[in-house]
């Protein structure tokens, strides 16, 4: 990671464009309103394209021309991707689109608009806010509130737990396996894929929890970004629980703009597919992300196509008479499909992703773990178990007894003290923890 | 507690402060109790990686001491060295640990006594810029409190270590199961070592690795530490040997850390034995457990070959 102060000008540029675009859209006649919206969108997408996708596209062009024995005359850019660019450009775009749609008044105060784009708790990794939810909060007076402080700190602590105890622990194992897939067995690759499912969830949702917690302490409410996604019973439900601020962004501004499901069936499938393809590209300039997005689009299309068949199977097998077993299998199948798509998301490149899939199904070697010190391996399972217990309770028994949100403040404090002790005891604080594989 | 609730319930400031103090008090008590318990059992261990470090730091009195990473740990057989040199030997090699760690151990050893011979096994990229060697100094945090001589090295881990060490648990972060294992006879057979050496028994069957990296950036701190390692040994008259033991790698260009270390060895007039392209080992995968480590057969052959070189010099 590098700190390049001049990159703040990129943010400054889009803020100025979007600030004036918002005012002009609101004041303009119909034709010009569209023009200003297009200018704003081009500015935002253009910056994203240059910083995030230019070199990727150029690399692909180079390879294509290379296969035709021709050299690519277009130079590569020596640029870094500014942190959080994908997040704050999407947040900025949601502002001009909402102003254009008439759902949001243009913000006249330049400082408040800048704050909307640069609100630091969620600047780097979301949640990607909407102007209707956030802008008005900057105009309200915020008084210090102990209740909010307590709630915010609890969220931050839970976020740290997920990041330090679970995500970073699992990352040790996942990185070792995924960076050398040829040296590991099918079962090791399968387990690393399941670990990665939890790693990415805990990593990403932890950042959201910390952002929401920080904002809460300061008196601001940000949108919920994750709702226990691995308890989803279908891929469609998964996307209603996973990275909600991004999923709803794509739904509101792309999927519905393309016509959503109020079109012919082939067009509906196309809409779904293209939205997820672009969602994949948003996650990173690499074919692995594009395939990951496309795969999720295909999951949804097939889910629609096979809906009738699925109902018939349920009736035929009689599994619908056992709702709990049915629920279990639906969650399990959804989780397996999600895990399969994570292989593409995590693999270093597409060919390695296919190699990993092949090895999972064909290689019968032993399970890889540090045999001299299996601590990290055991902590990985323990941390997933802790997460599962907390999320299972929240999902199915939310109103029942709670340690972390108990009305008795002593039990409550004891629970949080224990969480801090667990972080100190088995959290991963730096690269000091390592797995020592012998091949 | 209900009475307490009644008294403080109406004053929100007091209410919050008391609840916060209560939380901090519980955290402090738990941290202190768990930390002290872990410390007690850590230093009560009788075998395993942690015990080997404690032994090297607090008890070792061998005349010949081997320093290095896992490659030292699995490559130098103390019994052969003892038989050949007629001196006692201990292998302090530790998996995943490199020069910084070795120097911290050396400082603890030199505070207690002066060995006659020290063998420092270096690895490729051991002087290159990377963060892991610094992070992995966390393994030495349990010794920070009682070994002031090691602190200057452990502090290289980061500027905030002193503050993190306010916690009694932090030095034993992630060591819980290893501490339990080191105190349980159940794991004793698996952890057995021979004066610090542990043989490996696999036979490598994969093709030789080809490596030929261009010169890379050398870490000035590590360079300084290597110089200090040599100076500290020479200051008390220890005979020091720097070694690059075999790896199943064909170096088309010699690793830049090894070139740099050879130059330093020359400057200080000490021996550097380079086995990086030794055909005795390079053409024989059956002598390796994996591409970086010799197996028992390989380590026996290597130890003898290394001793021949010492005896010839």
Image (tube, rainbow, N blue to C red):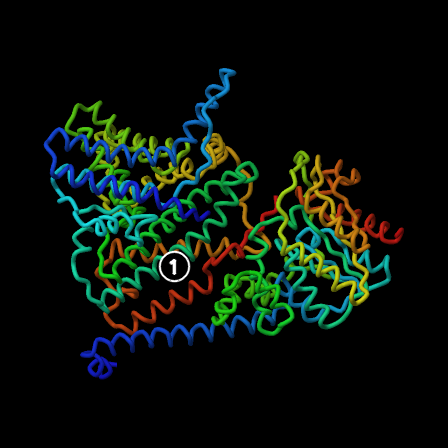
Give how far across and how far down residue A67 sits, in percent.
50, 18
Dot 1 falls on which chain?
Answer: A
* Above or below, B215 relative to B187: above
Q: Is residue B310 above or below residue A234?
A: below
Q: Which residue sits at x=23%, y=51%?
A: A111
Query: Which residue is found at the position 26% from the left and 63% from the top?
Result: A151
What residue is shown at x 34% (from left), y 33% (from top)? Answer: A293
Residue A319 appears in the picture as rendered = no
Q: Residue A12: where, in percent of width, then height? A: 31, 44
Question: Which residue is nearer to you in this view: B280 or A327?
Answer: B280
Q: Nearer the viewer, residue A43 or B54?
A: A43
In the rendered image, residue B307, in percent from the top left (x then y), is placed at 84, 52
| Quadrant for the N terminus of chain B in the image | bottom left
Residue A63 in picture, x, y percent from top left = 48, 23
Q: Residues within 10 Å of mark 1 (few under 14, many from 20)?
A: many
Q: Quadrant of residue A333?
A: top left
Please count the marks in the image.
Answer: 1
For residue A333, say whether it is visible: yes
Residue depicted at 70% across the width and 40% down the height: B248
In this picture, residue A310 sits left or right of residue A197: left
Circle 1 SS class? helix
Residue located beneath label 1 in the image:
A161
Please tell me which residue lies in front, A399 or A321.
Answer: A399
The extreme right residue here reads B312
Compared across the picture, whether B14 is left or right of B167 comes to left
């Amino acid at each position: 990671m590098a700190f390049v102060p001049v990159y703040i000008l990129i943010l400054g540029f889009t803020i100025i464009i979007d600030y004036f675009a918002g005012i002009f859209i609101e004041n303009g006649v119909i034709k010009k309103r569209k023009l200003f919206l297009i200018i704003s969108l081009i500015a935002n997408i253009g910056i994203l394209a240059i910083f995030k996708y230019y070199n990727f596209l150029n690399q692909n062009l180079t390879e294509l021309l290379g296969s035709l024995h021709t050299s690519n005359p277009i130079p590569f850019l020596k640029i870094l991707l500014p942190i959080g660019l994908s997040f704050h450009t999407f947040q900025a775009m949601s502002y001009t689109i909402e102003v254009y749609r008439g759902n949001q008044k243009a913000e006249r105060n330049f400082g408040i608009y800048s704050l909307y784009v640069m609100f630091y708790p969620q600047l780097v990794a979301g949640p990607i806010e909407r102007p209707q939810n956030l802008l008005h909060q900057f105009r309200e007076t915020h008084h210090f509130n102990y209740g909010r402080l307590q709630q915010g700190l609890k969220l931050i602590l839970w976020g740290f737990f997920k990041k330090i105890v679970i995500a970073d622990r699992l990352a040790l194992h996942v990185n070792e396996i995924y960076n050398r897939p040829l040296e590991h067995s099918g079962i090791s690759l399968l387990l690393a894929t399941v670990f990665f499912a939890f790693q990415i969830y805990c990593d990403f949702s932890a950042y959201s929890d910390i952002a929401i917690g920080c904002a809460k302490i300061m008196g601001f409410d940000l949108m919920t970004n994750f709702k226990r996604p691995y308890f989803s019973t279908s891929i469609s439900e998964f996307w209603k629980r996973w990275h909600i601020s991004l999923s709803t962004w794509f739904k509101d501004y792309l999927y519905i703009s393309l016509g959503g499901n109020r079109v012919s069936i082939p067009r509906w499938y196309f809409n779904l597919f293209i939205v997820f393809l672009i969602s994949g590209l948003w996650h990173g300039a690499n074919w692995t992300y594009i395939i990951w997005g496309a795969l999720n689009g295909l999951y949804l299309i097939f889910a629609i196509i096979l809906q009738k068949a699925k109902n018939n199977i349920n009736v035929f097998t009689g599994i619908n008479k056992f709702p709990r077993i049915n629920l279990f299998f639906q969650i399990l199948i959804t989780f397996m499909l999600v895990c399969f798509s994570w292989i593409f998301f995590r693999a270093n490149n597409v060919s390695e992703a296919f190699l990993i899939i092949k090895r999972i199904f064909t290689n019968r070697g032993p399970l890889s773990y540090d045999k001299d010190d299996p601590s990290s391996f055991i902590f990985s399972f323990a941390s997933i178990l802790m997460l599962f217990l907390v999320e299972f309770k929240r999902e199915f028994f939310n109103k029942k007894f709670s340690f972390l949100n108990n009305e008795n403040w002593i039990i409550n404090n004891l629970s949080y003290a224990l969480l801090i002790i667990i972080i100190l005891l088995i959290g991963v604080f730096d690269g000091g923890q390592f797995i020592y594989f012998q091949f | 507690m209900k009475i307490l609730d009644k008294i403080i319930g109406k004053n929100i400031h007091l209410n919050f402060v008391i609840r916060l103090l209560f939380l901090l008090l519980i955290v402090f008590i738990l941290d202190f109790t768990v930390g002290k318990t872990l410390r007690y059992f850590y230093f009560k261990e009788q075998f395993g990686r942690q015990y080997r470090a404690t032994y090297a730091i607090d008890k070792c009195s061998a005349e010949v001491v081997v320093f290095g990473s896992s490659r030292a740990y699995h490559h130098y057989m103390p019994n052969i060295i003892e038989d050949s040199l007629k001196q006692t030997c201990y292998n302090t090699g530790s998996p995943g640990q490199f020069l910084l760690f070795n120097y911290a151990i050396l400082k603890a050893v030199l505070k207690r006594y002066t060995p006659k011979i020290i063998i420092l096994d270096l690895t490729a990229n051991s002087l290159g810029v990377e963060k892991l060697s610094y992070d992995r100094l966390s393994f030495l945090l349990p010794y920070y409190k009682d070994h002031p001589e090691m602190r200057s090295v452990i502090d290289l881990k980061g500027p905030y270590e002193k503050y993190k060490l306010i916690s009694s648990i932090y030095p034993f972060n992630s060591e819980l199961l290893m501490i339990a294992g080191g105190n349980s006879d159940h794991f004793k057979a698996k952890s057995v070592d021979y004066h610090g050496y542990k043989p490996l028994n696999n036979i490598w069957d994969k093709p030789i690795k080809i490596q030929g990296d261009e010169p890379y950036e050398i870490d000035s701190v590590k360079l300084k530490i290597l110089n200090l390692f040599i100076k500290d040994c020479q200051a008390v008259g220890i005979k020091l040997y720097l070694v690059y033991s075999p790896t199943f790698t064909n170096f088309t260009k010699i690793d830049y850390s090894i070139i740099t270390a050879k130059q330093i060895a020359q400057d200080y007039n000490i021996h550097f034995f380079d086995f990086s392209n030794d055909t005795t080992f390079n053409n024989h995968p059956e002598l390796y457990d994996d591409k970086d480590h010799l197996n028992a057969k390989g380590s026996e052959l290597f130890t003898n070959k290394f001793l021949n070189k010492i005896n010839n010099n």
